[in-house]
Amino acid sequence: MFLGIATLGKQSSDFVATYWHESVQLTEAKLVIPIHWDSFFDPLDEPSKALPRAMDSFSDNMKMLLALARRDNVELRLPTPFAPIDLGSSD
């Protein structure tokens, strides 16, 4: 599943838990690839950076998502820009 997480780090833990439940658990996703976490202010030919802290908290976001993923035995993998994603592999 490609899961949009923009500004999720600014939401309450209850909101994140409900979002995870409705998006990941109910669909029985085994692989979650977070999207829309990176800054759209930076050029695409530079390494991805998280949105500015004023817009989101990437570290808080990832802490919550990693805990939920571990609990539910779901793989969480950040995408690499312009690289193919093998959805059948856990590498």
Image: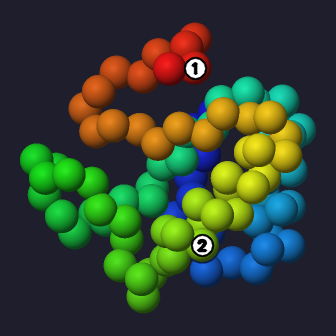
Whole-percent x, y for residue 20 in the image: 78, 53
Q: Is residue 62 visible?
A: yes
The residue singled out by tag 2 in the image is 60
Give residue 70's position: percent from left, percent from top.
77, 44
**Distance from Cα at disc 1 to Cα at disc 2:** 24 Å
Quadrant of residue 83 in the image?
Answer: top left
Judging by the rendered image, the residue that carries numbered circle 1 is 90
Is the C-beta separation of discs 1 and 2 under 8 Å? no
- Quadrant position of residue 67: bottom right
Query: Which percent across, then down, holds residue 56?
Result: 49, 77
Q: Is residue 50 above or below residue 32?
A: below
Q: In the displayed structure, does residue 88 sit left or right of residue 84?
A: right
- Name the kind of residue labelled 1 in the image: Ser
**Residue found at x 60% / y 72%:** 60
Badge 2, how many Cα within 10 Å: few under 14, some, many 20+? some
Residue at (29, 62) in percent of width and height: 49
Residue 87 in view: no
Q: Disc 2 marks which amino acid?
A: Asp
Left or right, residue 76 beside residue 67 = left
The one nearer the camera, 74 or 8, is 74
Residue at point 50% right, 20% down? 91
